[in-house]
Image (cartoon, rainbow, N blue to C red):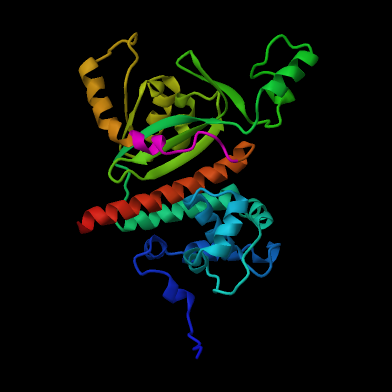
Amino acid sequence: MNQLKMVSLEMLVPQDHRYRKFKQVWDFKFADQKLNKLKKDNPNEGYGLPVLFRCLLLQFLEDLSDRELEIFLQENTAAKWFCGFDLTDSTPDHTVFTKTRKRIGTYLISRLFEQLKVQLRAKGYMNEVFTFVDASHLIAKAALWEERDKVIQQKYETLNNSNISKVSSDKDAKIGCKGGNKFWYGFKKHISVDMQSGMINKVAITPANITDAQGFKHVCPQQGAVYADKGYCTKPAVLSAKRKGIHLCAIKKNNMNGKNHDLDRYYTHIRSPYERVFSHTNKRVRYKGIVKNQFAAFMEAMCFNLKRMLVLAEITIG
């Protein structure tokens, strides 16, 4: 004899699932309020931007492509629960996610990132007393072989940053150089990390030819001391620190006056634990252009902070 058993989606998600913990830490009321203001212009009727934003959050939490996210939402009950779907609800196809990212935009996602930081500060996870700053390279979604051939056809002598935007499919990408022998084509990600918690305070995407010191103004904290490597000992970073009134603890280059090897070794020792923030990041961009990749950088930073929060919570409980 067959028996019918009623099962709800709430019952299928374990109580200790990390998606539940994310919702306990992040109050989505502010995000939902801001996203619902775009409701009148929302082309994705039936889902709503708050639901689709949670879908995008899972995309970056699990490092999924749009097509992979479509399948993930169809098959994963915890994902359905986190986003607000019922067990039998249809979930979005991959074309919806591109429209959603464009609709939310970089400005609004930056507001949501800031609000998450406010909530984490209120819970004692973050502050800006001591900050670690660094930058890493991001390789563009475009090869240079076709660009090189186009340059030859147009009778340019070399392919460089003055002409690459004329022939490249990604107009924002540039050729970057580090140490005089490491070159890449794409962008640079600048990040400031709170040294109390290891969480990301600020993140900015620039063309690859922007130096670390020039990009420092985008991630410079409002207070405290900043620990940085040799890329931040030059004038642009020093001026940015002076404007904000912060103390810049940057390692000096060997040929600079006032070089103190003992002090620089101390700075290196202080900075080393926070290099892990960069060791786990993808070195290839998802999209073309600064705007789309800045959106991705904010989403990745939010996800990193949520994951880091779970680690800190376990340490506190332990």
Of residue 36 and residue 15, the one placed in the foreground of this image is 15
| Residue 283 part of the magenta segment | yes
Residue 199 in the image: x percent, y percent?
Answer: 36, 45
Q: Is residue 45 magenta?
A: no
Where is residue 201 drawn, in percent x and y? 40, 44
Residue lying at 47% horizontally and 64% vertically, measured from the top left: 28
Work out whether residue 14 or residue 279 is closer to the camera in this orientation and state it: 14
The residue most toward the front is 1
In which quadrant of the rendered image does the C terminus lie? bottom left
Q: Say which quarter of the image contains residue 25.
A: bottom left
Q: Residue at x 48, y 85 (%)?
A: 5
In the rendered view, does 196 fall on the left or right side of 74?
left
| Left/right of residue 259 with respect to residue 154 in the rendered view | left
Q: In this view, does 297 lie above or below 165?
A: below
Residue at 44% from the left image edge and 42% from the top image edge: 202
Q: Nearer the viewer, residue 239 or 294?
A: 294
Between 158 and 30, which is closer to the camera in this rendering? 158
Given the current orientation, which residue lies at the most extreme bottom position?
Answer: 1
- Magenta span covers which residues? 275-286
Residue 231, horizontal then vertical, whole percent: 41, 22
Position of residue 40 relative to residue 118, above or below, is: below
Q: Quadrant of residue 175?
A: top right
The percent coordinates of residue 40 (x first, y second) are: 68, 66
